[in-house]
Image (spheres, rainbow, N blue to C red):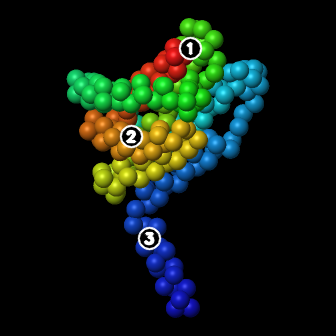
């Protein structure tokens, strides 16, 4: 009996130390799992656009599941990054980061591994309108992706574990979500995850990171189509 009392005491101490952090980690994990395994029938889109449909569906799961947990956590959308304060500052921030990234994006566009992987949707090569549709889908998905990582996880955990640890935690799934991409991109996702985390904290919003992420992706897609 003393063993079980000690076990229960230690378990209770752990669970009650920061229950909201456990809820946030669990909800985010659930969203990643559902986004991967919960599939919908999108056959009506046709084989060419089915991948884009699944991309949007996964993004919606990443957005909706965390948002549903906010009342339980007593958090508002603004508390998890739905804000756009100081546009003059975050526009300069993302402009600087984009300029720093641009030479790497141009280099990547000429590498065989990236040419096989991009544009992200093959139908983007079919013309201007399909290309625009592909970019629209990409922005929607990246907005949701940035929310769950640099909004929900980052700001949700920051209150309990501090800024540096919150940036570190959200970088891990960001890198994992790049598995299957070209190796240089996957390795670079670690640096990008930290930079995007700092960008979000600096501006108290995940939206500038979503804009920057999309701008880099759109540039790579455009170069892949043109080359």
Residue 78 percent location from the top left of the image: 36, 36
Residue at the limit of the structure toward the bottom, as seen here: 2
Q: Secondary structure at mark 1?
A: helix
Nearer-N-terminus badge (1/2): 1
Residue 25 in the image: above or below residue 51:
below
Q: Label 3: how many residues lie within 10 Å, few (<14), some (14-19) or many (20+)?
A: few
Residue ID at (30%, 53%): 164
| CB-based contact (under 8 Å), mark 1 and mark 3 | no
Nearer-N-terminus badge (2/3): 3
What label does residue 108 carry, if any?
A: none
Residue 224 percent location from the top left of the image: 52, 20
Q: Quadrant of residue 196?
A: top left
Residue ID at (37%, 44%): 191
Q: Label 2: how many residues lie within 10 Å, few (<14), some (14-19) or many (20+)?
A: some
Q: Is residue 139 visible?
A: no
Give how far apart the Cα atoms at labels 2 and 3 are: 32 Å
Residue 218 percent location from the top left of the image: 47, 21
Q: Secondary structure at mark 3?
A: helix
Q: Observer-nearest residue: 216 or 105? A: 105
Judging by the rendered image, the residue that carries numbered circle 1 is 131
Judging by the rendered image, the residue that carries numbered circle 2 is 192
Q: Quadrant of the N terminus?
A: bottom right
Give how far apart the Cα atoms at labels 1 and 3 are: 50 Å
Q: Secondary structure at mark 2?
A: helix
Nearer-N-terminus badge (1/3): 3
């Amino acid at each position: 009996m003393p063993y079980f009392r000690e076990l229960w005491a230690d378990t209770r101490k752990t669970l009650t130390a920061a229950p909201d952090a456990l809820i946030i980690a669990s909800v985010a994990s659930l969203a990643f799992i559902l986004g991967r395994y919960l599939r919908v029938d999108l056959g009506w889109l046709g084989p060419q656009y089915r991948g884009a449909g699944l991309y949007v569906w996964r993004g919606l799961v990443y957005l909706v599941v965390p948002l549903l947990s906010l009342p339980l956590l007593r958090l508002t959308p603004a508390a998890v990054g739905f804000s756009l304060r100081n546009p003059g500052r975050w526009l300069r921030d993302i402009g600087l980061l984009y300029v720093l990234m641009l030479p790497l994006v141009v280099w990547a566009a000429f590498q065989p591994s990236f040419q096989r992987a991009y544009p992200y949707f093959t139908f983007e090569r079919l013309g201007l309108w399909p290309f625009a549709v592909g970019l629209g889908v990409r922005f929607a998905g990246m907005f949701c992706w940035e929310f769950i990582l640099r909004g929900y996880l980052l700001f949700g955990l920051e209150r309990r574990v501090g800024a540096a640890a919150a940036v570190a935690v959200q970088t891990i799934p960001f890198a994992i979500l790049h598995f299957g991409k070209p190796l240089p991109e996957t390795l670079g996702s670690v640096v990008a995850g930290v930079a995007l985390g700092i960008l979000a904290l600096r501006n108290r919003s995940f939206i500038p990171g979503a804009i920057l992420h999309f701008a880099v992706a759109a540039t790579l897609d455009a170069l892949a189509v043109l080359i």
